[in-house]
Amino acid sequence: MSVTTLTSGVTWPGLRPWLGTLVRLGLAAVWLFAGAAKVGDLAGSGRAVNAYQVMPFEVAKVIGAALPFVEIALGVLLVVGLATRAAAAISSALLLVFIAGISSAWARGLSIDCGCFGSGGQLAAGQSPSYAPEIARDIGFLVLAAFLLVWPRTRLSIDRWLESTT
Amino acid sequence: MSKRQQGKSAAKVVRKQLAAERRRKRTMWVSIAAVAVLVIAGLIGWGVYQSQRSDAGPLVAPASATTTTGITQGNGPVQVQLYEDFLCPHCKDFEATSGSAITDLVNDGKIKVTYNTVAYLDPASTTEYSTRSAAAAACASDGGKFKEYHDALYAQQPAEGSAGLSNSQLIAIGTGMGLDQGSFGQCIDSGRYKPWVASITDAAAAAGVTGTPTVKVNNQVIPNPTPEAIVAAVNAA
């Protein structure tokens, strides 16, 4: 019957859900670290958003206070594997916004830290910004999110458990 | 294929379609719930931020300051705005190289200088030293010793990442300059000027100040604030 699976042992369809679990947990760790680094200083998080100079300070304060909590919630959804595709879609959208923000700061010649994992704001004299590595890192995270967007079914997830109950 | 078999497979197709429909609906509702969770998380963040602000107590400004601007010294025609954080090493360097030039300009009656002692680096100490030290300097302003106290804090600047000076150390520095142990100590221990520090920090961010030290002469940022550059900008103003 299924000669192929017997002979090759490890197949892409068999491996993919497990690889997806790794990807999901990796992306979850990114969001949890990013959120946890900022949650202790919500005012500073607002200033980091404000440093991009793309919105009024009042708006930046709201975004800055809300973002760490949204990141942590996204991380929790991904850890437990609930609504994986929706979480991956929102992750992708957020990462695209971050990449656009960093690119725009770079293009406008601002000298800021991205504030991705805490700190943020203007760099001291003599420090040069590291926009290229920051963007490269975010593109890496975007690849993880895209993987889950395409293949949201992963092992050890609530999604899978829900699936099995129907 | 017999009729019976046909009927069976048709039923199977219908069952499959129903199951697919159920799956689609469930995925939709789970996704909607997930988005709702994220929205609620964001609202919680905003709520936490608001309550942190209102828990800090009433907003009162110390002597020689307003509720949104730092402590001002001198009566000269040119306005110099300094944005400094007591924990920021570059601010210490700036004070070492340019501090006396600014004091001379004040004494010559050329400028009035506002020390916006912002707390940008609260996460860089384990005890929110930026806020505590700036609030202590505001207490010193009430006792007429702001500049002396300000200079003493830079002379004894703790390292980033440390706990900073304790409240009793901050009080001891003030009493060493003749500030009243009782009222100065109470001012620091009660955190009277912490809301004011948060307010001038917000005002600085709203004014587009993203880092410390920042020096403005008549509202123009001096990109490299050497003593010569500051004096030149003041003379040109």
Image (cartoon, helix red, strand yellow):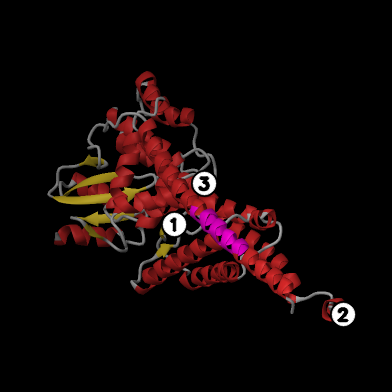
Secondary structure of the residue carrying tag 2 is: helix
Label 2 marks which chain's residue?
A: A
Magenta: main secondary structure: helix
Q: Residue A2 appears in which quarter of the rendering?
A: bottom right
Q: Residue A98 appears in which quarter of the rendering?
A: bottom left
Tell me the crowding category of disc 3: few under 14, some 14 to 19, or many 20 or more residues within 10 angstroms, Cα based.
Answer: some
Of residues B223 and B207, the one drawn nearer to the viewer in this rendering: B207
Q: Is residue B217 left or right of residue B18?
A: left
Amino acid at the residue labelled 2:
Thr
Tell me, for residue B223, which label it has, or none: none
CB contact under 8 Å: marks 2 and 3: no
Label 3 marks which chain's residue?
A: B
Q: Are marks 3 and 1 on the same chain?
A: no
- Between the residue at mark 1 and the residue at mark 2, the CA separation in whole angstroms equals 53 Å
Span of residues in magenta: B18-32
Q: Is residue B121 left or right of residue B9?
A: left
Amino acid at the residue labelled 3:
Ala
- Return the residue at label 1: A120
Of residues B95 and B196, the one drawn nearer to the viewer in this rendering: B196
- Between the residue at mark 2 and the residue at mark 3, the CA separation in whole angstroms equals 63 Å
Tell me the crowding category of disc 2: few under 14, some 14 to 19, or many 20 or more residues within 10 angstroms, Cα based.
Answer: few
Q: Is residue B88 visible?
A: no
Secondary structure of the residue carrying tag 1 is: loop
Tell me, for residue A7, which label it has, or none: 2
- Return the residue at label 3: B159
Q: Is residue B134 above or below residue B221?
A: above
Secondary structure of the residue carrying tag 3 is: loop
- Between the residue at mark 3 and the residue at mark 1, the CA separation in whole angstroms equals 19 Å
- Quadrant holding the N terminus of chain B: bottom right
Instruction: Indicate the position of residue B148 as horizontal and vertical percent values.
Output: 33, 37
Q: Are marks 2 and 3 on the same chain?
A: no
Q: Tell me which numbered mark, 1 or 2, is placed earlier along the sequence.
A: 2
